Image: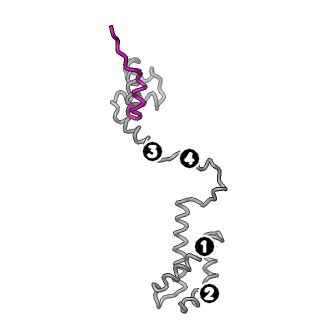
């Protein structure tokens, strides 16, 4: 313990300068120097006896700084809760959107080709029923019936509970 203090103490101003140049923030640089010194003291027994203590401590500081910079890049800047508005927290979860998108693509792939092509031409390509009929060389009534069946199958695949209500009550004719 006594041999490390005379080696480490004179390095503190240089460590602070280097940390400030890396992080460009005084408080963060001071925290970094403290973490570096804690690590150097706790691992003093691991350094090479014949090695340069100055280079070893600067290497610790540099590695800690690079880890912090990478972590900040991944997480984004730290903002106090009072400094940001409520709208920053009001974001929809991206995971649910990705799952819905995956399910929709799967349901679309399960449709028969003739229904899928009509649905895509009308919904995605924004063609009119008459234009779709000309493109596919089928009657306009066939376009409408295929589109209706495709929409119903998609609804049943995406929301099975809602599909039962969409069809309406199951009425029978009694004579």
**Dot placed on the residue nearer the N-terminal end, 1 or 3:** 1
Q: Quadrant of residue 143?
A: top left
Mark 3 is surrounded, within 10 Å at the Cα level, by few (under 14), some (14 to 19) or many (20 or more) other residues, namely few
Q: Position of residue 24 (x, y in %)?
A: 64, 69
Residue drawn at point x = 60 percent, y = 84 percent = 11
Label 1, on which residue? 31
Mark 4 is surrounded, within 10 Å at the Cα level, by few (under 14), some (14 to 19) or many (20 or more) other residues, namely few
Decide: is 134 above or below 92: above
Looking at the image, residue 91 sits to the left or right of residue 163; the answer is right
Decide: is 18 above or below 133: below
- CA–CA distance between discs 1 and 4? 32 Å
The boundaries of the magenta stretch are 156-175
Label 4, on which residue? 91
Q: Are marks 4 and 3 in contact (CB under 8 Å)?
A: no
* Protein image colouring: one colour
- CA–CA distance between discs 1 and 3? 39 Å
**Dot placed on the residue nearer the N-terminal end, 4 or 3:** 4
Label 3, on which residue? 98
- CA–CA distance between discs 4 and 3? 14 Å
**Dot placed on the residue nearer the N-terminal end, 3 or 2:** 2
Helix or strand or loop: what does disc 1 sit on? helix
- CA–CA distance between discs 3 and 2? 55 Å
Label 2, on which residue? 10
Looking at the image, residue 131 sits to the left or right of residue 69; the answer is left
Residue drawn at point x = 53 percent, y = 64 percent = 71
């Amino acid at each position: 313990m006594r041999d490390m203090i005379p080696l480490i103490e004179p390095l503190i101003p240089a460590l602070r300068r280097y940390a400030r140049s890396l992080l460009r923030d005084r408080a963060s640089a001071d925290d970094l120097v403290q973490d570096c010194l804690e690590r150097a003291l706790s691992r003093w027994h691991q350094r090479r006896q014949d090695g340069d203590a100055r280079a070893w401590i600067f290497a610790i500081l540099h590695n800690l700084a690079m880890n912090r910079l990478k972590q900040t890049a991944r997480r984004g800047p730290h903002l106090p809760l009072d400094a940001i508005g409520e709208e920053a927290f009001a974001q929809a979860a991206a995971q649910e959107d990705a799952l819905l998108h995956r399910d929709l693509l799967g349901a679309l792939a399960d449709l028969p080709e003739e229904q899928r092509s009509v649905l895509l031409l009308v919904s995605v390509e924004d063609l009119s029923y008459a234009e779709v009929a000309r493109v596919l060389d089928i009657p306009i009534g066939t376009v409408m019936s295929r589109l209706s069946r495709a929409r119903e199958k998609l609804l049943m695949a995406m929301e099975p509970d809602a599909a039962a209500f969409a069809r309406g009550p199951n009425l029978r004719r009694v004579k």
